[in-house]
Amino acid sequence: MSPLNIGVVGTGIFARDGHLPVFQDHPDKFKVVAAFNSTKSKALDFAKLAEFPEEKVFDDMDSLINDKDVDYVDVLLPAQFNLDAVKKCVAAGKPVQIEKPIAANMKQARELVEVAESTDLPIAISENWSFLQAINVAREHLPRIGEVVGFQHNSTGPFVLNNKYMATSWRQHPEHIGGFLSDGGVHQLALVTALVGEIESISALTSQVREASGDDDIVFSTLKIRNSKCIGSFSYGSAFGATDKWIYLKIYGVNGSIMIELNNKAAPIVRVKVGSDAEHSGEEEVYNVKEDKSFGIYEEFTNFHDAVAKKDKSLLISSPRAAFHHLACVAAFIESSAKKGDHVEVERY
Ligand SMILES: NC(=O)c1ccc[n+]([C@@H]2O[C@H](COP(=O)([O-])OP(=O)(O)OC[C@H]3O[C@@H](n4cnc5c(N)ncnc54)[C@H](OP(=O)(O)O)[C@@H]3O)[C@@H](O)[C@H]2O)c1
């Protein structure tokens, strides 16, 4: 694999702490060659860290996208800017990967999928949770537990006062629907839907616990899976008082169950029990999973690199269509809660 040249748009916290370390750890695949940031000084700092010349810090997004040295564009902006960035990249014939959530609202998300599906260019969403090894391990064992009829997902934790992300003004005054429910909740929905399937309808209550969250920050819900009798629950929020960070997905089949524990992200645990009833239950099998230290980011960019290098967008795992579904679930949480928990259909593309 030879390295592809990357132009980074939006050199904020996650570009520096999330994407850049992966690019620098894998020079065989990735080379950052240019950047644009609305506050230029931050892009100049980023250029130093990424070790490319200051001349490749551009004053506007168009110049970066059209730069002949840039093979593809990595966009890390608040979600309301994703659609515009993707349109510009498509117009310039440049592959682009944008951070999650796909867009700030469903109208933009729909248009973004339309644009992405109108071109042969690879266009992907940086949804690192779609690339977790824990999902792959659980998926291997899924056929052993028979028909999946239920699930329980929980991702709850304490409010973190010194959360570096909380200090960003676009999160404090979110234009993206549901604030933290879409910012972080789409990761959880990527995990759940990867293993139990697409969600058809939702009944939810959401609420805002912390003023600093800028919008609702917890959700408790029940869900129905499309084309299946599988039902389950989904709880999300890190806005509580002192409590353990508790992230798990339990999947119930008619012939057993699978539990994914993600409390320790570096070392998830997958537990499998096979058997048709309490009297015919095998021993619990415990699989200790090793995640890459980037928690899926390395794998997401490797997948994107493949699609760009081979000019084959069908290789992409984290498609705009998949991310549309994740955001549509958040929209359904909000709609259902506004209707006092009525069951609502999840918008389909
Ligand atoms: N996958 C994950 O686990 C994960 C984790 C964290 C973040 N993310 C995603 O990464 C992206 C960046 O998040 P971050 O935490 O790095 O936030 P951040 O540090 O605030 O960076 C946001 C970037 O967007 C720019 N920006 C903000 N408002 C803008 C505006 N009105 N016009 C133009 N540019 C604007 C900022 O430019 P200035 O520097 O000029 O303000 C900065 O470059 C988001 O899409 C977020 O969802 C993903």
Image (cartoon, rainbow, N blue to C red):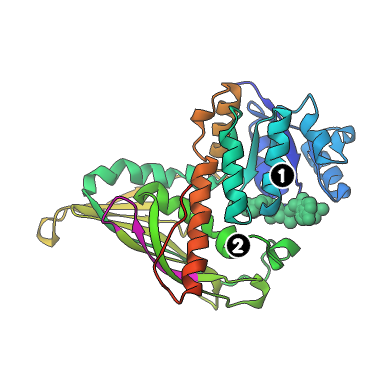
Disc 1 secondary structure class: helix
Q: Residue furthest left?
A: 279
Residue at 86% over, 43% down: 44
Residue at 77% over, 33% down: 65
Q: Is residue 347 above or below residue 24?
A: below
Residue 74, picture quadrant: top right
Mark 1 close to ligand 1, CB under 8 Å: no
Amino acid at dot 1: Asp
Disc 2 secondary structure class: loop
Residue 250, picture quadrant: bottom left
List the residue tagged with mark 1.
84
Residue 91 highlighted magenta (yes or no):
no
User: Closer to the camera, 252 or 346?
Assistant: 346
Q: Is residue 33 left or right of residue 109?
A: right
Q: Position of residue 341 (x, y in %)?
A: 43, 74
Q: Which residues are magenta?
A: 219-230
Residue at 85% over, 33% down: 56
Q: Earlier in the sequence, mark 1 or mark 2?
A: 1
User: Closer to the camera, 91 or 51?
Assistant: 91
| Residue 102 visible, this orientation | no
